[in-house]
Amino acid sequence: MSSETWDGDDESAAGRFVPLYVLVNGRTAPRDSTLDLATQVVALTVDTRRLEPEYLEIVRRCSGWISVAEIGAYLRLPLAIAKVMVDVLVEQGYLAVGTPAQQKIIDKHLLDQVIAGLERL
Amino acid sequence: MDRTSVKVVVAGGFGTGKTTLVASVSEIPPLTTEEILTEASLGVDDTTGVEGKTTTTVALDFGRITISPDVVLYLFGTPGQDRFWFMWDELAQGAVGAIVLVDTRRLDSSFPAVDYFERRGIPFITAVNRFFGECAYTEDEIRGALELDERVPLVWCDARDRESGKLALITLVRHAMARLRVRA
Ligand SMILES: Nc1nc2c(ncn2[C@@H]2O[C@H](COP(=O)(O)OP(=O)(O)O)[C@@H](O)[C@H]2O)c(=O)[nH]1
Ligand SMILES: [Mg+2]
């Protein structure tokens, strides 16, 4: 298998090849297409005893609101995989989903809040 | 119970200070996550079965700013290489807009970013990272080189400085709001 590396900057060519079959439950994309890397999720109080360890680890990370990107970073899961796994957990009632970033219906009130928040920094 | 995400993209050529800016305004040290690039997204012909398909990964850094108990702003730095445009689409989706960092020693390295947001009608501002305090160009010269529309704000910044990063962010959000008003 060939391999190539690229570290996210142009100084070196990094990256490794990952077979697609590692993607979960035969899914390569989440069913909920609004599930974005900035979308936040939080664990619901339900019985997690039947969850596989990889899923349980995600639910444990979600004791407070956390984005899909953060889950990927902390658990070292590629985003595509984090997204599909989070989607499965949402569908099965383990996680609740927050409001995703959305340009089209972005309202003035929200942006006012953002400016006020930034000014307080 | 709800939590709203707001997204901002930090773009620009390699070495223009994207990671530095994210780090200076983020409340957590920047995190790195990887995205899988499929052959389709890289434009490779797909002739094999699922098991034979391979992908490569690209790393991206991001940070966060808690705006209020209900709202968190996420800042995503773009990967620097042009062949990863598909990643830009994912980052730009739903974003308030973008800050395009410009290094005056290599103005042209930020041109693809300006062009990308311009074409898609995504609100953006340019932030000229002065690095060593000196700048050989006037604002007009920079605007000319980047073919900037006169309505696109240009701010001078030091990506290492939190206040400077804050100012760039506030300028972007104000610009995005002004555009909303125009559209309505
Ligand atoms: N002097 C100076 N150096 C900077 C500034 N911004 C970034 N740098 C440095 O320039 C280099 C590239 O910055 P980085 O944030 O990694 O660029 P990126 O490739 O766009 O993420 C790093 O060594 C930074 O420390 C600045 O405003 N002034
Ligand atoms: Mg960087």
Image (spheres, coloured by chain):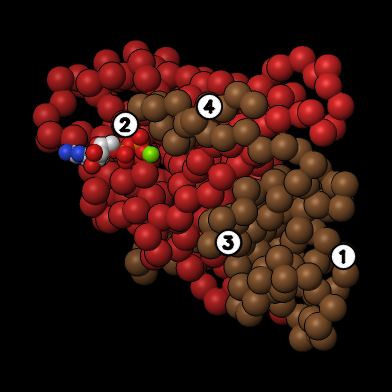
List the residue tagged with mark 4: A4
- Marks 1 and 3, the one that precedes in the sequence: 3
Q: Residue at x 61, y 73 (%)?
A: A61
- Marks 4 and 3, the one that precedes in the sequence: 4
List the residue tagged with mark 2: B15
Q: Secondary structure at mark 4?
A: loop
Q: Secondary structure at mark 3?
A: helix
Q: Residue at x 46, y 42 (%)?
A: B77
Task: Residue A110: give x, y in percent of width and height.
Answer: 59, 61
Mark pair 3, 2: CA separation: 28 Å
Q: Nearer the viewer, mark 2 or mark 4?
A: 4
Q: Is residue A29 above or below residue A44?
A: above
Q: Is residue B83 above or below residue B100?
A: above
Q: Residue at x 53, y 34 (%)?
A: A15
The disc numbered 4 marks a residue on which chain?
A: A
Quadrant holding the N terminus of chain B: bottom right
Q: Residues within 10 Å of mark 1 (few under 14, many from 20)?
A: few
List the residue tagged with mark 3: A75
Q: Nearer the viewer, mark 1 or mark 3?
A: 3
Chain painted in brown in the figure: A
Instruction: Answer left or right for A91 relative to B98.
Output: right
Mark pair 1, 4: CA separation: 35 Å
Would you identify the image quadrant in which residue B17 lies? top left
Q: Is mark 2 within 8 Å of ligand 1?
A: yes
Mark pair 2, 4: CA separation: 22 Å
Name which residue type carries label 1: Glu
Task: Residue B47: give x, y in percent of width and height.
Answer: 83, 17
Chain painted in red in the figure: B
Instruction: Answer left or right for B70 relative to B108.
Output: right
Q: Residues within 10 Å of mark 4 (few under 14, many from 20)?
A: few
Quick check: which quadrant has ligand 1?
top left
List the residue tagged with mark 1: A91
